[in-house]
Amino acid sequence: MLRHALTEAELDLWQLLRSRQLCDIKFRRQVPLGPWIADFVCFEHMLIAEADGSQHADSRHDDSRDADLRRRGFRILRFGNNDVLANPNGVSEIEEPPSPRGLRPRPSPTRGEG
């Protein structure tokens, strides 16, 4: 079910993903995919990013959801709410392996790479 208000962790993660800030890719938020709603989706790279609370640990529902989304061709990145809230810089520095479409992290101007 689509929600109007994001959780604090989802809002923080959205701030990291929006406007092509992560790996220069475009994410959309709260996207229906079949019977599921993904927190954040990049269709160009078939990538889903999720901010999850502790209720998602060892969730059979999430396992079947993830399996269905993988069958649809998506890769899924899951971030714990505590990780997003406590270490947003660590979340923003993820390095996904290059995909066939060339997903690569953006150079960091703060480290003299850009």
Image: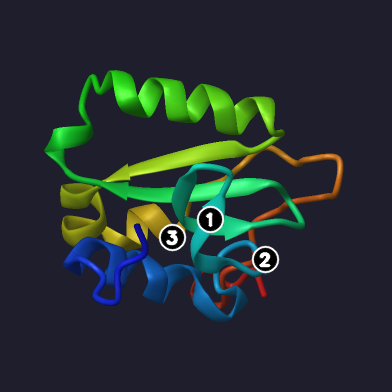
The type of residue carrying mark 1 is Pro
> Which of pointers 2 and 1 indicates the residue nearer the eye?
1
Q: Earlier in the sequence, mark 2 or mark 1?
A: 2
For label 3, the residue is: 92
For the N terminus, the quadrant is bottom left
Reply above or below: 109 against 39: below
**x then y, percent, for residue 59:** 25, 23
Reply above or below: 114 against 9: below
Judge the density around disc 1: few (<14), some (14-19), many (≥20) Cα neighbours within 10 Å: few
Give how far apart the Cα atoms at labels 3 and 1 are: 24 Å
Task: Name the residue: 57% across, 77% down.
Answer: 109
The type of residue carrying mark 3 is Ser
> Which of pointers 3 and 1 indicates the residue nearer the eye?
1
Q: Looking at the image, do the residues carrying marks 2 and 1 touch, with CB atoms under 8 Å apart?
A: no
Q: Earlier in the sequence, mark 3 or mark 1?
A: 1
Quarter where residue 92 is shown: bottom left
Q: Nearer the viewer, residue 1 or 13?
A: 1
Judge the density around disc 3: few (<14), some (14-19), many (≥20) Cα neighbours within 10 Å: some
For label 1, the residue is: 32
Give how far apart the Cα atoms at labels 3 and 2 are: 12 Å
Q: Secondary structure at mark 1?
A: strand
For label 2, the residue is: 25
Q: Looking at the image, do the residues carrying marks 3 and 1 touch, with CB atoms under 8 Å apart?
A: no
Q: Secondary structure at mark 3?
A: helix
**x then y, percent, for residue 68:** 56, 27
Judge the density around disc 2: few (<14), some (14-19), many (≥20) Cα neighbours within 10 Å: many
